[in-house]
Amino acid sequence: MSSILPAPHAATITVGDGDAERVIATLVRPAAEATPADAPALVWLGGYRSDMTGTKAVEMDALAAEKGLQAIRLDYSGHGASGGEFRDGTISRWLEEALAVIDHFAPKSVVLIGSSMGGWIALRLSQELARRGTGPRVAGMVLIAPAPDFTADLIEPNLSEAERASLAERGYFEELSEYSPEPNIFTRALIEDGRQNRVLTGIIETGCPVHILQGMEDPDVPFAHALKLVEFLPVDDVVLTLVRDGDHRLSRPEDIDRMKAAILSMVGTGL
């Protein structure tokens, strides 16, 4: 089937007005003509400073090609091919962009695949779609090393005095990144906005199955954080897969296989 499917096409949409306007880059693979109309689209939600051409995002698209599903990928503002300044980014801003992309392409139902910070965005997306009462049905979520509330739970409690001083004086602090020669930048705006987007404060009703994949040797998001998330998902069909030797990226072939199996469990294997 994949050999006759068109390649994903690049498109941009504009989000925001005035000084807040930014151009968001997307890669969208259309569904095959024979695919049932009610089959969900796969939506990739990347992590902090990652982009839509990373290993897991590309493998998600490959799975969509194999099964004839629509696949939607985007770069948040300040990431990858999108416009905007990274330092202007907040959870609210990136959530607005993800919502705008979904509204623009208007799938009837979606499976949200969120990696790291993208797991937080996925959870907030489901809440916003439910609050609005419009938009696609969320058929399922696959959360890979999810980092909901990471600013409040994983960053703020561990700030050094020097980092607190930098936030107060410069509005940001930097830390070395294991994944890039450029340092990670965390702004005061990101941290303050993160408090307004916390989800680990009460029962999270996604209304759909959730499969969490979490490495037990993840140096960035401890597996205890995934266990905490499960506590806030008591009413949903939740599966937690702990990968004993898994790191934060979970991009090895065996990890990709787990991701694809989890996605297929949401969309069905009969496609």
Image (cartoon, rainbow, N blue to C red):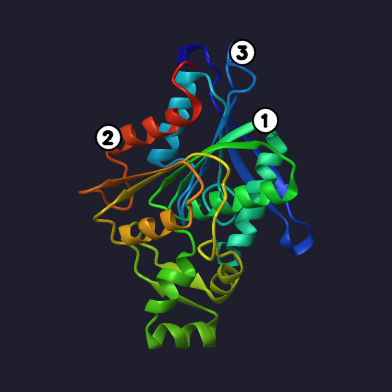
User: Looking at the image, can residue 222 be seen?
Assistant: no
Q: Residue 213, position in %: x, y?
A: 36, 45
- Mark with earlier residue (2, 1): 1
* Residue pictured at 32% horizontal, 53% vertical: 248
Residue ranking furthest to the right: 18
Q: Residue 114, position in %: x, y?
A: 48, 46
Residue occupied by mark 2: 253
Q: CA distance from mark 3 to mark 2?
A: 30 Å
Q: Is residue 269 left or right of residue 109?
A: left
Residue ranking furthest to the left: 245
- Mark with earlier residue (3, 2): 3
For label 2, the SS is helix
CB atoms of marks 1 and 3 within 8 Å: no
Q: Name the amino acid, label 1.
A: Lys
- Mark with earlier residue (1, 3): 3
Q: Nearer the viewer, mark 1 or mark 3?
A: 1
Residue occupied by mark 3: 33
Q: Nearer the viewer, residue 170 or 44?
A: 44
For label 3, the SS is loop
Q: Name the amino acid, label 3.
A: Glu
Q: Nearer the viewer, residue 87 or 260?
A: 260
Q: CA distance from mark 1 to mark 3?
A: 15 Å
Seen in the picture, residue 34 relative to 121 is either above or below; the reply is: above
Seen in the picture, residue 258 relative to 221 is either above or below; the reply is: above
Q: Nearer the viewer, residue 17 or 265?
A: 265
Residue occupied by mark 1: 108
Q: Residue 15, position in %: x, y?
A: 72, 51
* Residue pictured at 47% horizontal, 12% vertical: 1
Crowd band around label 1 with a 10 angstrom C-alpha radius: few (<14), some (14–19), many (20+): some
Q: Quadrant of residue 84?
A: bottom right
